[in-house]
Amino acid sequence: MNEYATHTTPAPNADESPQHVLDVDDLSDDDLAAVLSTAADLKAAHRRGEPHALLPNRSLAMLFEKPSTRTRVSFEAGMTQLGGHALFLGPGDTQLDRGEPVGDTARALSRYVDAMMARVFDHDALESMAAGSSVPVINGLSDDAHPCQTLADLFTVYELFDGFEDASVAWVGDGNNVAQSFAVGAAMAGIDLTMATPEGYEPDAEVLSRADARGTAPEVVHDPEAAVAGADVVYTDVWVSMGQEDDREEKIADFEEFQVNDDLLASAPDAAVMHCLPAHRGEEITSEVLDGDRAVVFEQAENRMHVQKALLAYLLGDQDTIETV
Ligand code: CP
Ligand code: NVA
């Protein structure tokens, strides 16, 4: 160490490999409990206006192949609140668009920054980044998974029910990225989850088997009314995900019976409604539901920032300091 050493970025090629979070089950049950508990402390500190600069001088590179509102801003504002800095690298901003392999990009970036978050189409790109990176790589959404969303979802359910044991959740809609990570995260948390998707839009069998390995895999059905009946939470996502625009007409037709509206919710009169956002009002959810009293979607969106700060602090921080937040 010398007078210029201001923080403890691991040396490249350090023996210990970094912990990547490409999906929620990259976290152990203890990791998950620690992240959710730290998120509660950080949310309370944020609400009280108390400084909590747990990551001074740390940098987070944020690579985006797809658009984002919540993920970008919650990570960027979150890093500032932790005393660090986040760099936005959008499509066209790096040499990736000119053909530099993503593994080489990650190898170089990890010499500068303390962690990377990436939003990509192909989940394999994250695997390549992780293979090349000497710092943690966090999935900010891929076509297959959205673990940061799941952390916020689990935290939101925890807040609503003061735990997970009494919460039954009905997923209504597409079984892709958000649903897949939630299926695994719900299993880890012990949430009773039923998923209603149109035929052909179920979560991948490999994902359900990972959920099974960490708890109980959700029951997957094709009748939204059966899934929603008696549920404590109804959760949905867009019908046309980023990158699926060419399939729009087909998907709208396939999902017609899966709109979250007042009729569907009649059999779950007290259910809270979650949505990862952005919402396509009038497609997967009506404005009446989204703007109604049962929707918790903006609290859920806020929680993205608290859980991601907790995750960054957990991956990069000094545990003794975090425990005193
Ligand atoms: N839920 C979510 O990831 O939102 P953004 O696409 O706005 O980041
Ligand atoms: N399934 C959606 C989630 C957006 C946060 C998508 O991939 O576009």
Image (cartoon, rainbow, N blue to C red):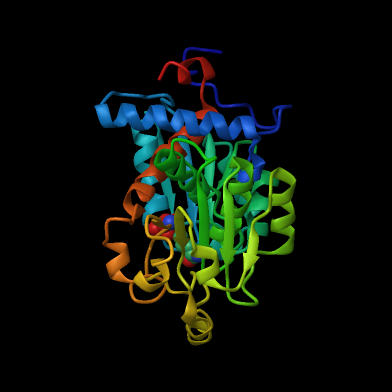
Up/down of 260 relative to 305, above or below: below
Residue 33 appears in view: yes
Q: Is residue 88 left or right of residue 222?
A: left
Quadrant where the N terminus lies? top right
Q: Is residue 101 left or right of residue 152?
A: right
Residue in the picture at 56% in, 53% down? 182
Residue in the picture at 70% in, 33% down? 17
Residue in the picture at 43% in, 57% down? 276
Residue 325 spot, x, y in % from top left: 40, 20
The image quadrant of residue 202 is bottom right
Residue in the picture at 56% in, 43% down? 109
Q: Quick one: 20 or 57, which is closer to the camera?
A: 20
Residue 82 appears in view: no
Residue 140 spot, x, y in % from top left: 51, 51
How many numbered discs, if any? 0
Residue 33 spot, x, y in % from top left: 56, 31
